[in-house]
Amino acid sequence: MIPRYSRPEMTAIWSPETRFRIWFEIEAHACDAQAELGVIPKENAEAVWTAKDATFDVARIDEIEAVTKHDVIAFLTHLAEIVGNDAARFVHQGMTSSDVLDTCLSIQLTRAADLLLADLDALLAALKARALEHKDTVRIGRSHGIHAEPVTMGLTFARFYAEMDRNRNRLEKARWEIATGAISGAVGTFANIDPAVEAHVCEKLGLRPEPVSTQVIPRDRHAMFFATLGVIASSVENIAIEIRHMQRTEVLEAEEFFSKGQKGSSAMPHKRNPVLSENLTGLARIVRSAVTPALENVALWHERDISHSSVERMIGPDATVTLDFALARLTGLIEKLVVYPDNMMANMNKFRGLVHSQRVLLALTQAGVSREDAYALVQRNAMKVWEQGKDFKEELLADPDVTAALSPAEIEDKFDLAYHTKHVDTIFARVFGE
């Protein structure tokens, strides 16, 4: 998590100030619930809230932790310095550190998910706008990097829209999955704290009580969350890779916006490189790197250990901050992407009609030629285009075995480009609705 790839709103979620503020709210709400149950005096619970406008001194907490070697105890000691020892006497009553740490992490991850959902909404809007803009902009589809059959640029954007829409649904589910809190005490039995305290704290902080928490919230929830972030990151890279390929000099069907004064190379003044897309590929790797550690965190010893703790302190901020930045960068890239329809058409025609080979193949089989023979007829003429630079349609018209089955008019008909785009509206209706 470095400033170069961070945005302030997401970064703020993971700041020490935010973390201690959430810890305070957990403890204060727990005191309220304890007071309602008659476990602690109401005046003591009310006194804790006098710190609600206080600025927690991060340096002071770190100083205390250097002695106690325990972050939650250091915070509680500092809280007592603010509200007074008598008011703080019943703070953390019946609780264990994981009650604070895990519930706080759930709040941070749900807040991060809300920002990421907003990021996805912005990206979806950009993809939809470009899809509608280029719904009928024909370009060559490729398989294995080789010309296949015509598609449209709009379909490319629509495909990415549908993928990101699925990711949004996944993230909503992952947010729900992670939005649980636990105030259940040592080993999760509620022996020293009433379950009503947990219910109260969770309600106040927008969480659900964890059904059975041992001493920690089960880490399969977190694994699901980070795995979802990894899938979204892979989709970001999927789009970035397509743009990188389109921007290659030999293709140049689209390119990243190149601003006035921008420089592409320290050595070669002519360069215009897909640096944003390449950066997104790298950022996706960072987000995905959090997935395996999150999966490995699921297996803890007995009711708890802390092997997961150091991992989550790193992957929580790193994965969410990086993905937030990547989604925002991708949105801007899509909005400003320069598309070259003329180059798309030039690439389409580079191999002189070869992209219509399947239509000729099917027409021959419809005319009574066996599929094996039809394939051989079409392929032998197609190879002349590859190897000798011939015109595919002219070769077919000159082939007596082909013209014995198809008339010149029937051959001509098979080179109608509009044939390949006749169901674009149907696909768009499936993706975007009627």
Image (cartoon, rainbow, N blue to C red):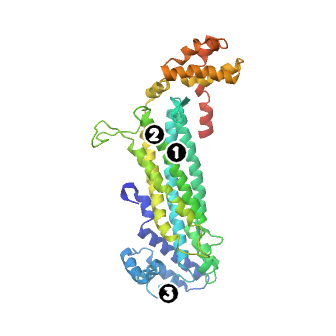
Disc 2 to disc 1, how far (Cα)? 17 Å
Q: Earlier in the sequence, mark 2 or mark 1?
A: 1
> Callout 1: helix, strand or loop?
helix
Front residue of 413 and 39: 413
- Position of residue 85 measured from the top left corner of the image (x, y, whole percent): 45, 87
- Position of residue 376 measured from the top left corner of the image (x, y, whole percent): 63, 22
Q: Which of marks 3 and 2 is nearer the N terminus?
A: 3
127 sits to left or right of 263: right
Q: Earlier in the sequence, mark 3 or mark 1?
A: 3
Q: At label 1, which amino acid type do we have?
A: Leu
Disc on res. 203: none
Q: Which residue is drawn at 56% across and 67% down?
A: 297
Q: At label 2, which amino acid type do we have?
A: Ile
Marks 2, 1: nearer the viewer: 2
- Mark 3 Cα shell of 10 Å, populated few (<14), some (14-19), many (≥20): some
Q: At label 3, which amino acid type do we have?
A: Arg
Disc 3 to disc 2, how far (Cα)? 60 Å
- Position of residue 58 measured from the top left corner of the image (x, y, whole percent): 38, 74
Please say whether residue 42 is visible from this viewpoint. yes
Front residue of 371 and 216: 371
The image quarter containing residue 264 is top left
Q: Judge whether 337 appears above or below 347 on screen.
A: below
The image quarter containing residue 262 is top left
The residue under label 3 is 89
> Callout 2: helix, strand or loop?
helix
The residue under label 1 is 124
- Mark 1 Cα shell of 10 Å, populated few (<14), some (14-19), many (≥20): many
The residue under label 2 is 243
- Position of residue 343 measured from the top left corner of the image (x, y, whole percent): 44, 28
Marks 3, 2: nearer the viewer: 2
